[in-house]
Image (cartoon, rainbow, N blue to C red):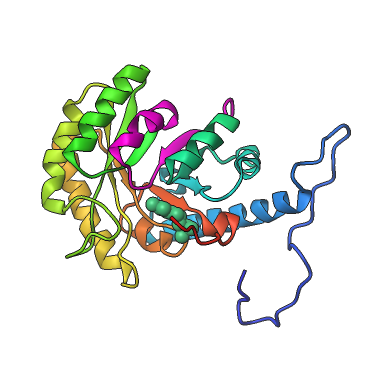
Amino acid sequence: MAGDGLTPARNDGPAVAPPEPEAGQVTAEPSGDRRETIRANLRAVRERISAACETVGRDPREITLIAVTKTFPASDVRLLADLGVTDVGENRDQEAAAKAAECAGLPLTWHFVGRLQTNKVRSVAAYADVVHSVDRPRLVSALSTAAVRAGRALRCLVQVSLESGAESRGGAAPADVPALADAVAAADGLELGGVMAVAPLGADPAPAFARLADTAHALRAAHPAATIVSAGMSGDLEQAIACGATHVRVGTALLGGRQAIVR
Ligand SMILES: *Cc1c(COP(=O)(O)O)cnc(C)c1O
């Protein structure tokens, strides 16, 4: 974690003393250090969420923290669950399917937050509770078929593109959101949860999140139960909360940097 600029950088280890082990307690795997790192990161992220809410007069209980665990092992998911995290997010089906299977039985809500190809939908529908990346009609019909076949109800968010021009980060153009939302709401096996977006790379996220808030507001007028606004990541969760985010998706700030993935 970066220094605060007020005190000289020191390396005294975690600021939080490890708890006294209780009698008979098994040492957390894979190491107590990892557990303490995640515990400290989780506390810091929760403090950021609380501070962001306080700034704009919101209640922190309105915010769901989704721990994005992509590239990190199932053992980290277990540690997060043990530390009280209830929601986890993944962005690649192959990795997510294996991890969800390893973590079956944990009281977790699984969020699929990555771009979704129709040939992965059947797999995703088996473990995901919420799909954040619905951005085209073909995906709605595929998800509906898969959810019905799996006997599950899938909550779907319409992903909104906040970029003008090339949609490098996925998502439907704002003008296409109402029709997509109607399609989700009408589809068997699917529930319309709300909207999701990723801020444009390298630009001020605030105006983009403000556009998302407008889209979310219009959606709620037509679908009052679609209250989810999934926005904000490690670098911009404060701006997202200021613009009405209900769900923040945080990876790096909880688990550390990821290795680049070569696809
Ligand atoms: C990886 C990812 C995140 C988390 O990003 P961090 O910057 O690591 O917090 C959030 N949302 C989506 C869609 C992601 O793919």
Residue 156 visible at all? yes
Residue 8 or residue 257, whichever sits in front? 257
Q: Quadrant holding ligand 1?
A: bottom left
Query: Is 105 displayed left or right of 143 in the figure?
Result: right
Residue 202 among magenta residues: no
Residue 165 sits above or below residue 131 on the image: below
* Screen quadrant of the C terminus: bottom left
The range drawn in magenta is: 103-128
What is the x, y in percent for residue 171? Answer: 24, 51
What is the x, y in percent for residue 232? Answer: 39, 56
Residue 108 among magenta residues: yes
Residue 218 sits above or below residue 144 on the image: below
* Screen quadrant of the N terminus: bottom right
Residue 103 visible at all? no
Query: Is 205 displayed left or right of 165 in the figure?
Result: right
Residue 50 sits above or below residue 5 on the image: above
Query: Is 208 displayed left or right of 92 in the figure?
Result: left
Residue positioned 83% across, 35% down in the render: 25
Specify the quadrant of the image occupied by residue 243.
bottom left
Residue positioned 12% across, 47% down in the render: 176
What is the x, y in percent for residue 132? Answer: 33, 42
Residue positioned 54% across, 53% down in the render: 46
Specify the quadrant of the image occupied by residue 92.
top left
